[in-house]
Image: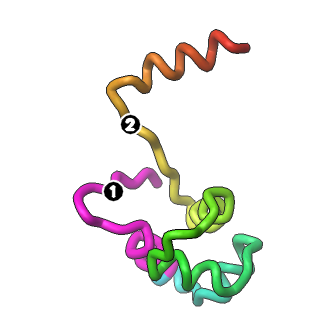
Amino acid sequence: MIITIVGNMEIGSVVRFHRRAAGLTQIELANLAGVGKTVVFDIENNKASIQCNTLQKVLNALNITITFESPLMKEFEEHEKSKS
């Protein structure tokens, strides 16, 4: 699932909605994602200091994908390809 976050929508709300839709408790999601039990609580409450790799584990467990969009994204992708 690809989610576009617009306006003032917060990632925590998206995670909470998907967790509940999956019928998971915060602890069950934490176990599934391989993170500590307070991580899901912190994400759902929009704690500012969540590490990206930790957030990615939780998003992966919920089958949520983050995509980056920018007017320069095509140029960035070409730059990355040229480094290989």
- Residue type (three-letter) at the residue carrying disc 2: Glu
Disc with the residue nearer the chain's start (1 vs 2): 1
* Numbered badge on residue 5: 1
Question: Is residue 27 a member of the stretch shown in magenta?
Answer: no
Applied colour scheme: rainbow
Image point 58% across, 85% down: which residue? 24
- Report the number of discs: 2
Q: Is residue 21 visible?
A: no
Vertical placement of residue 78 versus 34, above or below: above
Question: Is residue 4 a member of the stretch shown in magenta?
Answer: yes
Residue 80 position by quadrant? top right
Q: Which range is magenta?
A: 1-19
Image point 57% across, 63% down: which residue? 59
Compared across the picture, whether 12 is left or right of 84 comes to left
Give x and y (percent) for residue 81. Answer: 63, 15
Q: Is residue 51 visible?
A: yes
How many residues crowd around disc 1 within 10 Å: few (fewer than 14), some, or many (20 or more)? few
Q: Nearer the viewer, residue 39 or 17?
A: 39
How many residues crowd around disc 2 within 10 Å: few (fewer than 14), some, or many (20 or more)? few
Give x and y (percent) for residue 52. Answer: 61, 57
Residue 63 position by quadrant? bottom right
- Residue type (three-letter) at the residue carrying disc 1: Ile
Give the residue number, with chain letter if any, for mark 2: 69
Give x and y (percent) for residue 74. Answer: 43, 20
